[in-house]
């Protein structure tokens, strides 16, 4: 799957937060100034072509729904970052976070302890 633009992620957030939507319902959720219905419809169809959305037909109207969960999308996005910038090594990611003081060694120890206790 291709990476989503910021606008495409915003549209997907509506589906992840609200479930199945018709394009008009999606438009009503958008902040002002709302996009034109045709523009939004095109964006939704492109998201469907990319495999992020599916639809159900109701006569001449389509109701769209997420084809991928938010969690699966986040995982895929994280995997891409790790692959692209850290040589597919999550250990390099953690090392970088510790080195840049984004995560402390004590926090890592607590994480390991909580993971071990959950695995029992």
Image (cartoon, rainbow, N blue to C red):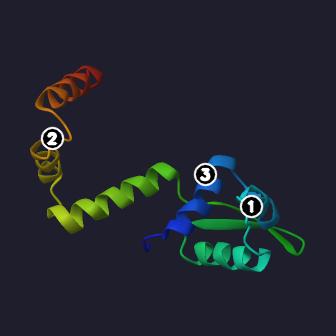
- Residue count near mark 2 (Cα–Cα under 10 Å), binned few <14, some 14–19, many ≥20: few
Question: What residue did someone put label 2 on?
Answer: 101
The quarter of the picture where residue 53 lies is: bottom right
Residue 72 on image: x %, y %: 44, 53
Residue 116 on image: x %, y %: 21, 24
Determine whether the residue tagged by mark 2 lies in a helix, strand or loop. loop
Do residues under tags 1 and 3 come within 8 Å of each other at their CB atoms? no
Name the side, left or right, on which 22 lies relative to 45.
right
Relative depth, front residue between 54 and 22: 22
Question: What residue did someone put label 1 on?
Answer: 26
Distance (Cα) linking label 2 and label 3: 33 Å
Mark before the other along the chain sequence, 1 or 3: 3
Question: What residue did someone put label 3 on?
Answer: 16
Residue 105 on image: x %, y %: 11, 31
Residue found at x 29% / y 23%: 118
- Residue count near mark 1 (Cα–Cα under 10 Å), binned few <14, some 14–19, many ≥20: many
Instruction: Determine the residue located farthest toward the right in the rendered image.
Output: 59
Mark before the other along the chain sequence, 1 or 2: 1
Q: Nearer the viewer, mark 2 or mark 3?
A: 2
Do residues under tags 2 and 3 come within 8 Å of each other at their CB atoms? no
Name the side, left or right, on which 24 lies relative to 117.
right
Mark before the other along the chain sequence, 2 or 3: 3
Q: Eyeballing the image, is 101 above or below 7? A: above
């Amino acid at each position: 799957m291709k990476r989503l633009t910021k606008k495409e992620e915003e549209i997907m957030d509506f589906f992840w937060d609200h479930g199945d939507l018709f394009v008009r319902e999606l438009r009503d959720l958008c902040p002002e100034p709302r996009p034109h219905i045709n523009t939004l419809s095109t964006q939704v169809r492109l998201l469907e072509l990319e495999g992020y959305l599916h639809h159900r037909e109701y006569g001449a109207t389509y109701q769209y729904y997420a084809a991928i969960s938010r969690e699966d999308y986040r995982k895929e996005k994280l995997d891409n970052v790790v692959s692209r910038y850290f040589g597919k090594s999550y250990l390099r990611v953690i090392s970088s976070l510790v080195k840049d003081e984004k995560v402390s060694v004590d926090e890592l120890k607590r994480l390991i302890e909580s993971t071990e206790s959950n695995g029992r």
